Image (cartoon, grey):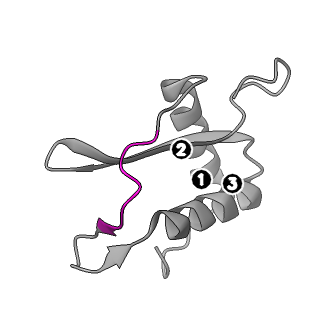
Amino acid sequence: MTGVKMGESMIRPLLAAWAVVFGCSFAAAQQLAITRLDGEQIEPAQIDATVTQLMQAAHVTGVGIAIFHNRKIVYLHAYGMRDTEKACR
């Protein structure tokens, strides 16, 4: 994920859309290392750190991430809050 620069105007709608699509609750899929398309592996902690950094940069309060491999979810996680007024995670 390094080397890709996205402006806040691009990140914010993307992150907000994920938050709306996934709703209040999530169950984590596998918490194992994920093999990327380039063959290297990425740990869930690395994904979490990247998403948290992007959320802070874009001032987004909640987002959901799903990573697929061969049409199966290999990573699923929600961050922050979907609705801060209702305190809905």
Q: Is residue 78 magenta?
A: no
Q: Position of residue 25 (x, y in %)?
A: 57, 25
Q: Which residues are magenta?
A: 28-34
Q: Which secondary structure is most common in the magenta stretch? A: loop
Quarter holding residue 58: bottom right
Question: Mark 1 and 2 residues: CB-CB less than 8 Å, in contact?
Answer: yes
Element type at mark 1: helix
Element type at mark 3: helix
> In whole angstroms, how far apart are the C-alphas of marks 3 and 2?
11 Å
Say left or right for 28 vs 35: right
Which quadrant is home to the C terminus?
top right
Name which residue lies at 75% across and 41% down: 61
Nearer mark to the viewer, of 3 and 2? 3
Q: Is residue 30 magenta?
A: yes
Q: Nearer the viewer, residue 58 or 37?
A: 37
Quarter holding residue 60: top right
Looking at marks 3 and 1 on the same chain, the residue that comes earlier in the sequence is marked by 1
Q: Is residue 66 above or below residue 47?
A: above
Quarter holding residue 79: top right
Q: Position of residue 42 (x, y in %)?
A: 39, 72
Q: Position of residue 31 (x, y in %)?
A: 41, 55
Q: Which residue carries the number 1 mark?
A: 11
Say left or right for 29 vs 64: left
Say left or right for 25 vs 60: left
Nearer mark to the viewer, of 3 and 1? 3
Q: Which residue carries the number 3 mark?
A: 55
Q: Position of residue 13 (x, y in %)?
A: 59, 41
